[in-house]
Amino acid sequence: MTYSISDVAKKLNLTVHTLRYYDREGLIPFVERTANGTRVFKESDVDLLKIIQCLKSSGMAIKDIKTFIEWCSDGDSTLQQRYDLFMEQKAVVETQMEELKKTLDVIEHKCHYYRVALDAGTEDVHKNNKIGNTVFD
């Protein structure tokens, strides 16, 4: 089965502009074109775009994603580099998750703080306990 650029954009919740940008940057070199230059995407192209989306959402730079795509084209000789790249990105994502967990902890604390204050009708309820006693509480 093949897809048009607009089909792929809808399928992956991307814009057509983004897909064209990825093409210009060399991230989807295998996408075929018709005689009049229209991009025709195969399922394997869509699968590659899902990997690109994953790497992009994890914070990887376009130039590094391009390197990964080039390594894929090089075949088995780059298996170690691709593995290392994903191990490094895994560590990046794990660090991001730890930071997000800390952020969530603060937000949960503040939700509790304000729920208690709302239930009491005043922030004064916190004056004699350690839930919050700064100007930002």
Image (spheres, rainbow, N blue to C red):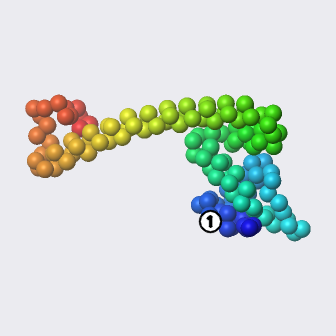
- From the top left corner, tell me how far across and down residue 88 is, in percent: 61, 31
Location of the N terminus by quadrant is: bottom right
Q: How many marks?
A: 1
Q: Secondary structure at mark 1?
A: helix
Please, is residue 74 above or below residue 30 in the view?
above
Position of residue 51 in the picture relative to residue 114 (left or right): right
Q: Residue at x 67, y 67 (%)?
A: 7
Q: Residue furthest front?
A: 76
Position of residue 86 in the picture relative to residue 122 (left or right): right
Q: Amino acid at mark 1?
A: Lys
Please, is residue 87 above or below residue 121 in the view?
above
Q: Residue at x 71, y 60 (%)?
A: 43
Location of the C terminus by quadrant is: top left
* Residue that badge 1 annotates: 10
Q: Nearer the viewer, residue 87 or 39?
A: 87
Please, is residue 18 above or below residue 60 in the view?
below
**Number of residues whose C-alpha sits closer than 10 Å to that of mark 1, classed few (under 14), some (14–19) or many (20 or more):** few
Q: Nearer the viewer, residue 76 or 11?
A: 76
Q: Residue at x 44, y 33 (%)?
A: 98
Q: Residue at x 27, y 39 (%)?
A: 109
- From the top left corner, tell me how far across and down residue 31 is, in percent: 79, 57
Figure quadrant of residue 18:
bottom right
- From the top left corner, tell me how far across and down residue 71 is, in percent: 78, 38
Res. 70 visible in picture = no
Res. 101 visible in picture = yes
